[in-house]
Image (spheres, rainbow, N blue to C red):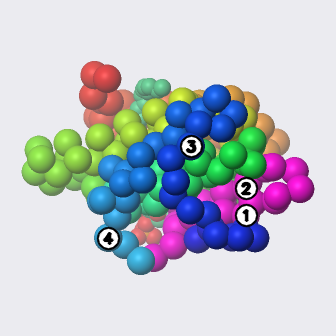
Amino acid sequence: MYARSGLLSQRSCSSHGRECATPVLAAQRRNNSTATKIAVEFDQSTGVAVMRLQGPPVNSLSLDFLTELCINVEKLEMDKNCRGLILTSSQPKVFSAGLDIMEIYGKSPERCGEFWRAVQEMWLKLYGSSMVTIAAINGSSPAGGCLMSMTCDYRIMADNPRYSIGLNETQLGIVAPFW
Ligand SMILES: CC/C=C\C/C=C\CCC/C=C/CC(=O)SCCNC(=O)CCNC(=O)[C@H](O)C(C)(C)COP(=O)(O)OP(=O)(O)OC[C@H]1O[C@@H](n2cnc3c(N)ncnc32)[C@H](O)[C@@H]1OP(=O)(O)O
């Protein structure tokens, strides 16, 4: 979902010194899902977009989720009026539970490869963004959730002792591929 006044066209541009993505994007080619796991509100007057993660129950990062996230970041990146992006969660108590472990458990090497490429695409898009990016971490954010927030320029976390954040994935026997 991308809510703002006016239509967002997928044009090539170089405003604000940015090189924009080509109109046909890798993430878009991959996206078959119609469900919306990301809601974006763009405030024209401030130039700041708020991206809410709304994948129940815990915003786990599935291939569909990552694809939708990348498409939305790309769209905002192409909008010369958008200068800032706040990433936050609509789910109670959880920012993101990290990678959807069902996407890697018992899957073929090809499928795992596709999934890890999508993970890489996500953090490269956020880390390389020309927008000022802020993770408003309003819940727990283990492993891939922590990675996602680390790729933002700034992080602010809700002060609640029940919320945790960190790279705990080795406890599950998961080692990120060599990038
Ligand atoms: C620039 C950077 C370069 C390099 C970076 C280097 C390294 C980065 C590597 C990143 C790698 C990441 C790997 C991963 O992310 S693996 C996933 C790790 N995640 C976890 O271990 C989280 C486990 N979950 C929890 O701790 C809790 O669920 C949580 C605190 C998030 C929420 O707790 P709550 O009590 O609110 O809910 P639950 O009842 O526990 O869960 C609800 C249902 O959600 C399911 N669930 C939870 N987490 C996941 C997940 N990750 N994937 C899929 N499903 C998940 C859980 O099983 C429950 O399901 P049901 O039982 O209701 O069916």
Q: Which image quarter holds the C terminus? A: top left
Mark 2 vs mark 3: give the one in front: 3
- Whether residues under marks 2 and 1 lie with C-beta atoms below 8 angstroms apart, the answer is yes
Q: Which residue is mark 1?
A: 41
View extreme (top): residue: 178
The kind of residue tagged 1 is Glu
Distance from the alpha carbon under mark 4 to that under mark 2: 24 Å
Q: Is residue 89 above or below residue 136?
A: below
Does residue 111 appear in this view?
Answer: yes
Q: Which residue is mark 2?
A: 50
Q: Residue at x 89, y 56 (%)?
A: 45
The kind of residue tagged 3 is Cys
Q: Which residue is mark 4?
A: 32
Which range of residues does the magenta coloring cover? Answer: 35-61
Q: Which residue is mark 3?
A: 13
Distance from the alpha carbon under mark 1 to that under mark 3: 22 Å
Q: Nearer the viewer, residue 95 or 113?
A: 113
Q: Nearer the viewer, residue 18 or 98?
A: 18
Q: For label 3, count other residues whose C-alpha is less than 10 Å away and answer few (under 14), some (14-19) or many (20+).
A: some
Say which element carries label 1. Answer: strand
Residue 129 as seen in the image, left or right of residue 131: left
